[in-house]
Image (cartoon, rainbow, N blue to C red):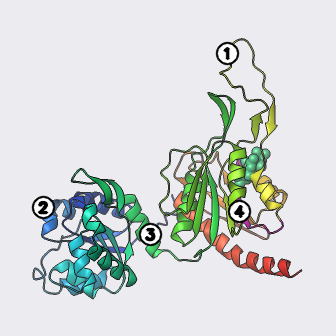
Amino acid sequence: MKNKKKVLKNKKILLGVAGGVAAYKSVDLVRRLKDEGASVNVIMTDAAKNFVTPLSLEIASENRVCSGVFDDPMSHINLPREADIMLIAPATANIIGKFANGIADDLLSTCFLSFKGKVVVAPSMNWRMYDNPIFQENLRRLTAHGVIQSGPDKGTLACGEEGIGRMADVSEIIETIKSAFSKKDFFKKKVIVTAGPTREYLDPVRFLSNRSSGKMGYAVARACIRRGAEVILISGPSCLEQPHGLKSFFRVETAQEMRDAMFKCLTETDVVIMAAAPADFSPEKKEKAKIEKSGKLSVNFKNTPDILSEAGKLKKKPLLVGFAAETGGRLDRAKKKLIQKNADIIVFNNVTAVGSGFDVDTNEITIIRKNKELSLPLMTKAAAAEAILDAVSDGMKKHAKSRRVESQD
Ligand code: CTP
């Protein structure tokens, strides 16, 4: 793959592991950060060593794990100076209390005080401690100073109780880190993303659908969130994990449901990105009971609503992005869709090309606008999503201008 552009590539992350039971997850966290192309230096508090060994983190990070302030007298200056971001996961009530009050009595807290960049904390503790007003005051104090919080989640805690306090999932923490590095050119923009296939039922057990995993649409939704947008994701059936940080999420099955969900949310929307692959046909009649297998079956189909075309006819239409998944290099068909559906951008991909088909993590796209065409090499769907958003961001400026002119007419 030629383009492996990753948000965390070559980023230097200083990870603080404090003494909470979730510390065992830090090994996985380090591995996943490294998979994203980052390098990781780990600082452990003494308490953390009760839950995970320095050796495990040393092997995972491929770096020496630091712990004592006096092991290397200048580490509290050098480690933060070399880092692009600081992450504390798990962040215990104790370490958050120290950070919030300027206490610097171990390597992690001294590094925090001397660090000049962005800091992410992933709190982890029992719900009683989390709810404590003194702890909440400390956390508020930190976030007021720009510290970014990831989690905690609700769920079963180490003590067996249910409540808030579980450290955020590793994938959620990584998303928060990516978001910290992302530009915020979609700040406060309202974006609707559609993803996945639809199902058009013939009877309660059989349906017509499209081959679509939803991966491209979910990657677009994630990229929008990272870049500061308020995102509504409308998804057909998909087994993908819901992106963290969505404003709303609608699970739909049929093209009609997708259309209705979208138009319900459309007011004040700046951008609609239709990455979904709605089925184009729906059986004219849906049987209430399972059709028996007796002889030949012929079915009459009707067209489903063309959601993108309908949005393209709106007087005050948002910026519209459609996808054209074609078999073969049919750029001509994709260009036709741009005009016919009155879209602002069409993202073309050839689903029969290697690495660009369904259910894979890569895509090779061409971004088509009225007077511009940008063909990109094979890349991850996450990187393709970023490229699509670059084009949308550029289009948003022109779109806002033309909307202003329209409203003056
Ligand atoms: N689309 C839509 N509603 C439909 C079908 C498609 O909004 N009922 C949208 C898709 O989400 C995509 C774009 O239209 O953004 C193009 O979809 P595509 O399936 O490539 O084209 P179709 O219009 O369905 O035409 P064809 O099947 O002939 O290629």
As measured in the structure, the alpha-carbon distance from the residue carrying label 1 to the one carrying label 2 is 63 Å
Question: What is the crowding at mark 4: few (fewer than 14 residues within 10 Å), some, or many (at least 20)?
Answer: some
Instruction: Give the residue drawn at x 46%, y 66%.
Output: 6
Q: Position of residue 173 (x, y in %)?
A: 38, 64
Per the rendered image, the range of residues in magenta is 315-329
As measured in the structure, the alpha-carbon distance from the residue carrying label 4 to the one carrying label 2 is 52 Å
Under mark 2, the amino acid is Asn
Question: Residue 266, which numbered label?
Answer: 4
Q: Earlier in the sequence, mark 1 or mark 3?
A: 3
As measured in the structure, the alpha-carbon distance from the residue carrying label 3 to the one carrying label 4 is 28 Å
Q: Quadrant of residue 399?
A: bottom right
Q: Is residue 381 left or right of residue 268?
A: left
For residue 8, say whether it is visible: no
Q: Earlier in the sequence, mark 1 or mark 2?
A: 2
| Residue underneath mark 1 | 292
In the foreground, 69 or 79? 69
In the foreground, 46 or 157? 157
- The answer to whether residue 132 is above or below residue 196 is below
Q: Residue furthest top?
A: 294
Instruction: For the residues labelled 4 and 2, say whether their Cβ atoms are less than 8 Å apart.
Output: no
Residue 318 covered by magenta stretch:
yes
Instruction: For the residues labelled 1 and 2, say whether their Cβ atoms are less than 8 Å apart.
Output: no
| Residue underneath mark 3 | 178
| Residue underneath mark 2 | 50
Under mark 1, the amino acid is Glu
Instruction: Give the residue drawn at x 27%, y 58%.
Output: 25
Q: Position of residue 141 (x, y in %)?
A: 34, 82
Q: Is residue 389 left or right of residue 298?
A: left
Under mark 3, the amino acid is Lys
Instruction: Give the residue drawn at x 82%, y 63%.
Output: 314
